[in-house]
Image: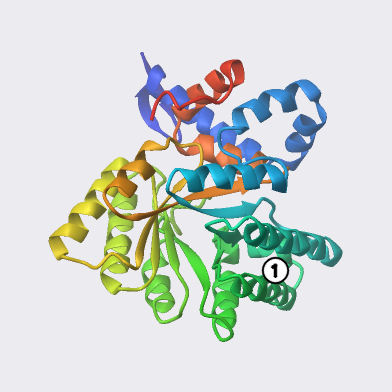
Amino acid sequence: MVTPTSSFGAQTTSEALPLLAADALRKIARDEHLKERIENDPLLSGIFKRAAERYIGGSTLPECIRTIKQVNAQGHAATADYMGESTRDEAKAEIETTHFLDLVAAIHAHTLNCTISLDLSHIGLAVDPALGIANAARIAVAARAIGREVIISMEGSERTDAILATHTELCRQFDHVGITLQARRLRTGADLQSALQRPGKIRLVKGAYDEPETLAHPRVSEGLNAAYRQHAQTLLASGHACSIGTQDRQQLEWAHAFIREQGLATDHIEFETLLGLGAAPAAQMRDLGFATRQYIVYGREWFMYVCHRIAEDPPRLFQALIDVVNGPGEAQHL
């Protein structure tokens, strides 16, 4: 049986349904009214929370600290991100900035090998660019005092220019504030060359945001895989501090082979994976002698993040169903 669809062409039902379900999940992630309905329904919120537990480090800071300790005990560094995005109120941005400062203090108090990741829109960029810069600088000062980095995450394409401008401004004051670039974006080659002229680690990821094909490579395409390898090659060979963010085994094998064949130094390189997507990729790179890091999100605003994580790889929908029934044990499909 063949099922033609506008998004995925002619495919068998078994091939098309997971892709259609993932596409629906992305739409759910963007629907604020549906999100509110799910969060306010004890049954629905309980179901979604069981599926989410694999991907988040907890709802509270103490829960996140416990997760970071577990990751550190496995020989990996961590980066912690207090979930939230698009704060539209200055008072709320102040509250969220204070929470990041509490995170920095907790990392220091527990002597954790952990950096801080954040969305600039979470701490005021969407209210006023100057507010975003000021609050990011406060966090950067606190992180510098304990010898830890801050990594700015990339958001949707409508905010790319503002995020890069903010990073450029912060780099006038700090050399430990990094930036994330998404390989999906067609503009990333030029953005990477600019970022290489600034201090701070560069984190390369594929990119999970829904973007038009005029701005980004198709989500599942050889064009995206090739772009990722091209940008990773530039980073690895540059000598600039970098974090190669992927748990794709083929990309990891390619990166290892490229480093070995080129005889590259590795003291500027780390490999970063997402919590909940299987420990094996990180352990593999750790055992090969590379620095490794796991990205840990926490907080109560997990809905959009988890929807994107599951939708990135349609088989994760089946894993989510298993988690709802059995709880989040080791991933079955990775």
Mark 1 lies on residue:
125
Q: Is residue 206 visible?
A: yes
Q: Residue at x 79, y 32 (%)?
A: 37
Frontmost residue, 60 versus 36: 60
Frontmost residue, 312 versus 275: 275
Say which quarter of the image contains residue 104: bottom right
For label 1, the crowd category at 10 Å Cα-Cα, with few meaning under 14, some 14 to 19 and many 20 or more, is many
Q: Quadrant of the image for the N terminus?
A: top left
On the image, the x and y values in percent for residue 111 come to 59, 58
Q: Quadrant of the image for the C terminus?
A: top left
Q: Residue at x 55, y 41 (%)?
A: 308
Q: Residue furthest bottom?
A: 172
* SS for dot 1: loop
On the image, the x and y values in percent for residue 153 come to 55, 61
Say which quarter of the image contains residue 150: bottom right
Q: Residue at x 33, y 45 (%)?
A: 221
